[in-house]
Each structure stands twice: as C-alpha cells, then as structure tokens.
Image: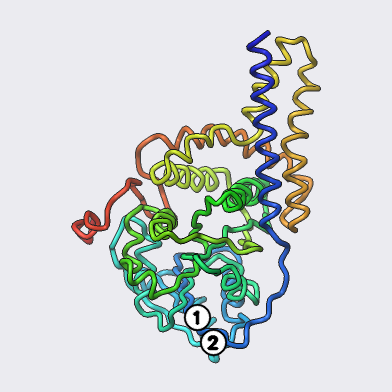
Amino acid sequence: MEPTFAAALLSIALLLSNLASILLASLKLKRPARIAPPANAPPVSIVIPARGVEPFAEETLERAFSLDWPRYELIFCVAHADDPVVKPITAAMARFPAIRARLLVGDDRISGNPKLNNCVKGWEAAHYRWVILADSNVLMPSDYVQQLMAAWRHGTGLVCSTPIGSRPDSFWGEVECAFLNTLQARWQYAGEALGLGFAQGKSMLWNKPMLDANGGIRALAAEIAEDAAATKLVNGLGLRVNLVASPFEQPLGRRTLGEIWSRQARWARLRRVTFALFFAPEILIGAAPPLVLALIAAADAGVSLPATAIAVLVAAYLPECALASAKGWQLSPRTIPAMMARDLMLPAIWARGWLSGAVDWRGNVMTIQTKTVAELEETPSGA
C-alpha cells in the first residue's frame, strides 16, 4: 500500500505545482493595454539581427517602422550581403524614409553563437544609451518601447520579453504555441514571481553605458546562449532581470515536427549547459509524469484507469487553457491535442539535453559548451 500511496501523493504534488506555477504567472502577466510614451521619452536604438526571410517578414518589418516613440533608430544586421532578407529590409527602409534606419553587413566571430556575432556591429553602431536587441520575427506593438521601458525599475539590469506564439498554420504550429505560451512563458513568469527572473533573448532592453562598463556586448559571449550570459552578468551585479507585463507576439505560420524538435532540442541543450541545476527537474514538468504515477497508483488500488487518466488530464490542461484564455493567447480546438503532443515530446527533449553533440541553428551548426570570454578571444575567427 505504501508504494501506491507514494505514487498517488507524488502525482498530486506535481499537479499542484503545475497549478501553482499557472497562478503565479497569472499574477505577473497582464493583457495588452496601450501605454502612451512619456513626455521626456529618451531616444532608443533598436538592433535587429536577421537571417533569411521568415513568415510574416513584411508585417514584422512594417511594425518596426511604425512604433509610437518620439525618437528611435533601427539598426538591421546581417552576416552576409547576399542574404535574401536584405531585399525586404531595404524595401522597408525606402517605404519609411522618416525613420532613421541602417543596414549593417558583416560577421564578427566573438563566439559560437551566430546571433550574438551578428549583433556586435549593431551594438557598436548604436547612438543612444538605451538599446533594444530584438529578434527579427517579433511582431512589435506600437507601444513596444513603452512596455519595455515601463518594466525598468530601481535595481533593474535588464528587461526582456518571452515570445508568445500566434497564428499557427498547422497542427505542429499549434504544438509550438503550446511550448512557447502556457509552458515556457508560464514558467518564466512564475520564476520572476519567485525572484528567479532570467533573460530571454527575443527582446532585451539594455542600458548601454551599464553593459559597456561591464564588458559590453562581448561579455555575452561568456556563454553559448546570450540570454544565459546576460542573466549571470546582471545577477552578478546585484541587479534583476524584469519581464514586460504583456509579452510580445511571434506569429508562427506553418511548422513541422522536425523544426520543433530541432528548436526545442537546441534550447534544452543550452539550458542544460548553462543552468544544469534548474534544467534537471524539467523531467517532472508536463502531464506525463503525474499521469504515469496516477495510473500506477490506480492499477494497484483497483481504480478505473480511464477515469484516472481523464481526471489527471483535466487537472493538467484545464488550468493551462484558462491561462491562455485570460491572457488572450492562442486557443483553439487543437490546443489540448497540441498540449498532449508537447508533453509526449518533453521527456525525449529532456534526455536530448543531456547528450553531447552539435545542434543546428537556422543553418549554422553549433557545438554547445561553456566558454569564458578569454577563451573565445583566443579562438581563431574561422573556427
């Protein structure tokens, strides 16, 4: 009887921790609400690394040129002049001549992280003391800068936003929404509520003099993931990473199983290498562990297995759906099947995180390991 009780108790504990994380996240998250720019709004530089033409590229570019902020500059960065994204960027620059914008080409090999390498020239060219590093597939709302600035408070070293997946055009796009929204965003905001805020590289607001005084953008090469390096740098200064109240949208379009696996496996490896103690318990998230434990307990106690499974899945997924509904995130008849597919993948993704080997980042092969800045500076540029 004791093993049965232990399995049932652990299953309930996991379901309660899942519910607690949703409640904590819901306290931090707000529905989007329009913020007007302040009267003394400082000028801002927005550095956007780009590679390849992504879905919704024209719309995301137009949004970047249409921000309701009195004075800002856009600095687009590409590694190679023949990148196909150069054409839509230059076309957007021509359509919005009133917005100060530049396109910089070049590849500064300061790390094994191609995105960070692409950002270096933009950071160094930025004119203003406030700099936002923004991924090219962020669908910026008109008050994008205001929302980032509003999260900067006393003791802040960095403000970030996790991506919220939207507009899936396939079942696997829906699965990616399930990963990004009610799983990853939820746990990130729950972590902030507990004082464990960590960076997310999708949108990062920096005070440029502060970072430059502590090694500049090159200091983010201390880890293979720039957001992990940013978290450690900011925490090391006794400052906090804050999250925006309403995270920004990333429209997804069509996704495939292979794309999701590649992306999630890469992120798992990055988390394992940079924050192993936080990564290890990830095997317990999702519906699979409490479901297996509950079924073991039910089988031993002679309780209906189908009824037990339904009860566990309702307890796991109904709060997730409620969170998505309350915050205006993607919710459709495919949401629960997508969550189930996600949770079936999670144990394999977690296991992949512990294995060595290279991963692919949009055509770039990355060998994920931790390096110090000094080691990176000694690495030949062609390595």
Classify the position of the N terminus by image quarter. top right
- Residue 58, can we see it? no
Tell me if 380 is positioned left or right of 132 in this view. left
Q: Residues within 10 Å of mark 1 (few under 14, many from 20)?
A: many
Secondary structure at numbered mark 2? loop
Disc number at residue 44?
1
Disc 1 residue type? Val
x, y percentage for residue 267?
47, 47
Disc 2 residue type? Arg
Q: Residue at x 47, y 71 (%)?
A: 48
User: Between 36 and 267, which is closer to the camera in this rendering?
Assistant: 36
Tell me if 19 is positioned left or right of 379 in this view. right
Secondary structure at numbered mark 1? strand
Q: Residues within 10 Å of mark 2 (few under 14, many from 20)?
A: few
x, y percentage for residue 219?
32, 62
x, y percentage for residue 210?
39, 71
Q: Residue at x 26, y 58 (%)?
A: 373
* Above-or-below relation of 363 to 218: above
Classify the position of the C terminus by image quarter. bottom left
Disc number at residue 174?
none
Nearer-N-terminus badge (2/1): 1
Q: Residue furthest bottom?
A: 98
Tell whether label 1 touches label 2 (CB within 8 Å): yes
User: Between 7 and 84, which is closer to the camera in this rendering?
Assistant: 7
User: Between 138 and 54, which is closer to the camera in this rendering?
Assistant: 138
Tell me if 2 is positioned left or right of 220 in this view. right
Q: CA distance from mark 2 to mark 1?
A: 7 Å
Image quadrant of residue 143?
A: bottom right
x, y percentage for residue 323?
74, 50
Disc number at residue 71?
2
- Residue 377, can we see it? yes
Tell me if 113 is positioned left or right of 302 in this view. left
